[in-house]
């Protein structure tokens, strides 16, 4: 399977929305260390999907998707911290966690598909 444009990858589209959501939620946050960490992690989710899509094989793409999934776990962990320290209210927390879970499910399915395709090739 060859992805022609990373912009067509569903997990990338959802990750892009996650970036926008997190940036907006933390727009007025003055804890620049925390803000930078969660923002970098969200951008990493999106960027690794894009970078992996342009690799030469499904195996390489899967490696980048796994890295993206790891960054997604970091975002989820930091989202719990944001709730606990009062940066996110409960509604914002639920929205970010729901989007993270959606992206995770899409990534997991895509990884399974790419691994199966690699074996058949």
Image (cartoon, rainbow, N blue to C red):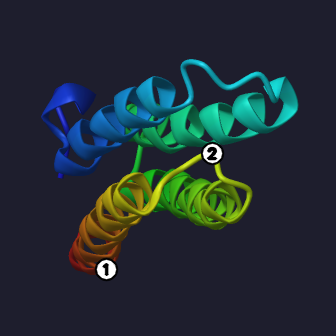
Q: In terms of secondary structure, where does tag 2 sit? A: loop
Indicate the quadrant where residue 14 lies.
Answer: top left
Q: Does residue 113 lie above or below 59 as drawn? A: below
User: Which residue is painted at 37% across and 57% down in the image?
Assistant: 58
Q: Can residue 55 be seen in this view?
A: no
The residue under the point 59% across, 55% down is 75
**As drawn, is 114 to the left or to the right of 65?**
left
Residue furthest right as drawn: 33
**Relative image position of residue 37 (x, y in whole percent):** 76, 38
In this picture, residue 81 sits left or right of residue 72: right
Spatial CA distance of label 1 from label 2 is 45 Å
Q: Position of residue 118 (x, y in %)?
A: 31, 70
Residue named by callout 2:
87
Image check: 70 left or right of 19?
Answer: right
Relative to residue 87, is residue 8 drawn left or right? left
Mark 2: few/some/many CA within 10 Å (<14, 14-19, 20+): many
Q: Is residue 5 above or below residue 94?
A: above
Q: How many labels does the image show?
A: 2
Helix, strand or loop at label 1? It is helix
Residue appearing at x 66%, y 32% in the figure: 40
Mark 1 or mark 2: name the one nearer the start of the chain: 2
The picture quadrant where one finds residue 6 is top left
Q: Nearer the viewer, residue 20 or 104?
A: 20
- The answer to whether residue 88 is above or below residue 8 is below
Marker disc for residue 119: 1
């Amino acid at each position: 399977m060859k992805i022609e444009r990373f912009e067509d990858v569903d997990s990338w589209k959802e990750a892009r929305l996650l970036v926008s959501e997190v940036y907006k939620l933390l727009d007025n946050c003055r804890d620049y260390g925390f803000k930078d960490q969660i923002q970098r992690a969200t951008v990493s989710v999106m960027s690794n999907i894009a970078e992996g899509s342009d690799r030469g094989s499904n195996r390489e793409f899967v490696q980048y998707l796994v890295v993206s999934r790891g960054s997604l776990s970091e975002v989820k962990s930091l989202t719990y911290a944001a709730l606990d320290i009062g940066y996110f209210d409960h509604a914002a927390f639920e929205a970010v966690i729901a989007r993270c879970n959606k992206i995770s499910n899409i990534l997991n399915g895509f990884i399974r598909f790419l691994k199966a395709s690699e074996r058949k090739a």
